[in-house]
Amino acid sequence: MTSVTLHGAVGEIGGNKILIEDGDTKLFFDFGLSFGKYGDFFSPYLQPRRHSIISDYMNLGLLPNLTGLYRQDYENRFRESSPEPKYDGVVLSHPHLDHAGFLSYVRPDIPAYCSTGCKAILQVFEESSYGFHEYTRIKESFKIRESKRDATKKVKDRSSVIPREVNIFKPTFKIDDITIHPFPVDHSVPGANSFVIETSEGSIVYTGDIRFHGRRANFSQFFVEKAASFDPDIIISEGTNVHEPKTYGELDLQHDLFSVIENVRGLIIVNFPVRDTDRMRSFIEAAKHTDRSLVVSMRQAYTLKTLEENGVSQVPRLDEVKIFVPKKGWGVLNDMNYPMEIQMQDYQSWENQFIGHDNTVTADEINNHPDQYIFRCDFAELKYLFDIKPPEESIYIRSVTEPVDEEMELDQKKVDNWLKYFGLYPYTQLHCSGHASGYDIQEMVRQINPKKVMPVHTERPTEFSSFHGDVILKGLGEKYNLS
C-alpha cells in the first residue's frame, strides 16, 4: 500500500514534511521548520530548551511524534530511542530552512538526498550561520569524558562528530521500492528541485517550491513536460501565491532597477535575500550598467565561493563582486598598532580567508568613492552605515518581501528609523516572488493533468478547487492512501 502523510505545510506557508510510504519503505520529502508556528511561541529572547527541544517541539506541533526518526542524543533525554532507524531517507527539494531546517534533528544514520547546490548551501549554513545547523555532520550532545588535565574529573565532550550520509541526486535513483526522478526548477535559491516519484501504486509529483518567472523558467517548464509523461495519480503542489495573478518577474525587476539607479550620484544601498543568487545577478547587471561594483557581505562571498568549489553553475562568481569587510570586535582592522594575529581574532575562521582578499573593500573606500558602488546592506548590517556615511543623493532599494506578520512589521519599523536617520527614507521597493503565481500554478496542474491535487505550502488550499475537480485536503498527520 502507498500513502502520503503531511506532517507540515498544512494551511501554512513552509514547514514541509511529507511522508511517502510504499510497502516497507518510508521516505520524507523535505523536513523543514515552520516559521509561523515557531514564531507563535519563540523569539530571539525566548529560545527553546536545548535538553528537551525535540519533546518541546512535539508538544507545540512543530515536530511529529514519531519513533525511529530523531537523533538519539536528544531523543534519549525524554524517552528511549529506537536502536535502529525506522525511516529510509530524507529527500530535500532545496536548502531553504522551511524545507530543510529540521534535518538537524534527524538521526545521522538516516541518509539525506539532495542536489549539489543544496548540499553546498547547507554546508555554508553549518559553518557561517548562527543557530542550530547540523546537516552534513552531527556534533553529539550530552556526552562526557575524562578531563585531559585531571583523570579524576569529568568534562563535557564536544569533540564527537558523526558524519551524515548526504547523497547527491542522480537523474534517476531508487530508495528501496521507490524510484525518484529529480528535476532542477526555477526558485529563489540555487539547487531547487521538483520530483516525480514512482511507487507500486502509481506516480506522485511533488513540486517543492517552484516558479516560472525567474532566470531558469525553462527548467520549470521542462519539469512540467516530463511530469505529464508519467500520467501521475497525484500532484503535491505548493500554493504560496495561488490567489495571485500573473507574477512580476526577475527580468522585469532588473529592467526597472536600471531605470531607478541610472541617474543616482550618491551611494546605492540595497537589501536582497542573502542566498538569492538570481537577485544578486540582477544587481550585478545593474552595477555594470552604471559603471559600479556590487559589494556583498562576507557570508554571501563565502556562499559564492562554496558554490563555485562544488561546481554549481548559473550562479555569480566571486570575481564579479566586491567583498565588504567591516570592522568587528575590537575594531582594529588595518590598525598597524595591532599585529595581524590580533586583528584576525575579530573574525570567525571562515571569514579570515577574505581579510586581504583582492576583491575586498572597507567602509573607508566606500565612503571615499560612493558613486562607484552598490552596497548590499541587510538589517544586521545597518550599523556599518556609521562608518560608510552615505552622502546626500544616496538611495536605498528594498528587494525583499513585504512584512507578513507582526514581528516583521516591527523589524521594518526599526529599519525605517535607520533609513530616516541617514536620509535614505522614503525608499524604493523592488521585489519579485520565489513562488509561482496562481495563473502559473493553474497552468502547471492543467499540463501535468494529475488525477488528484494535494495542496501544501499555502494558506489558501481551497483555491485549488477553482481549477481542479478532485482536491485532497488532509489535516496534519492524516494519512492518504493512493489506492
Image: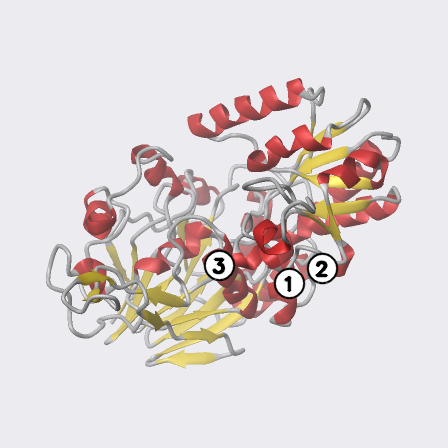
Q: Is residue 266 left or right of residue 354?
A: right
- Percent of width and height locating residue 26: 28, 70
**Image quadrant for the N terminus?**
bottom left
Q: Secondary structure at mark 1?
A: helix
**Image quadrant for the C terminus?**
bottom left
Q: Marks 3 and 1, Cα distance to the nearest angstrom?
A: 13 Å
| Foreground residue among 172 and 289 | 289
- Percent of width and height locating residue 413: 54, 21
Are dots 3 and 1 in contact, CB under 8 Å? no
On screen, residue 1 above or below 177:
above
- Percent of width and height locating residue 234: 40, 61
Q: Is residue 84 left or right of residue 22?
A: left
Q: Is residue 480 left or right of residue 401?
A: left
At label 2, the amino acid type is Leu
Q: Residue at x 11, y 58 (%)?
A: 79
Q: Marks 1 and 2, Cα distance to the nearest angstrom?
A: 6 Å
How many C-alpha atoms fall within 10 Å of the one at disc 2: few (<14), some, or many (≥20)?
Answer: some
Are dots 2 and 3 in contact, CB under 8 Å? no
At label 1, the amino acid type is Lys
On screen, residue 103 above or below 51:
below
Instruction: Give the mark nearer the N terminus: 2 vs 3.
Output: 3
Residue 192 occupies quadrant: bottom right
- Which residue does the numbered mark 3 point to in the structure image? 127
Q: Secondary structure at mark 3?
A: helix
Are dots 1 and 2 in contact, CB under 8 Å? yes
- Percent of width and height locating residue 47: 31, 39
- Which residue does the numbered mark 2 point to in the structure image? 318
Label at residue 241: none
At label 3, the amino acid type is Glu
Label at residue 305: 1
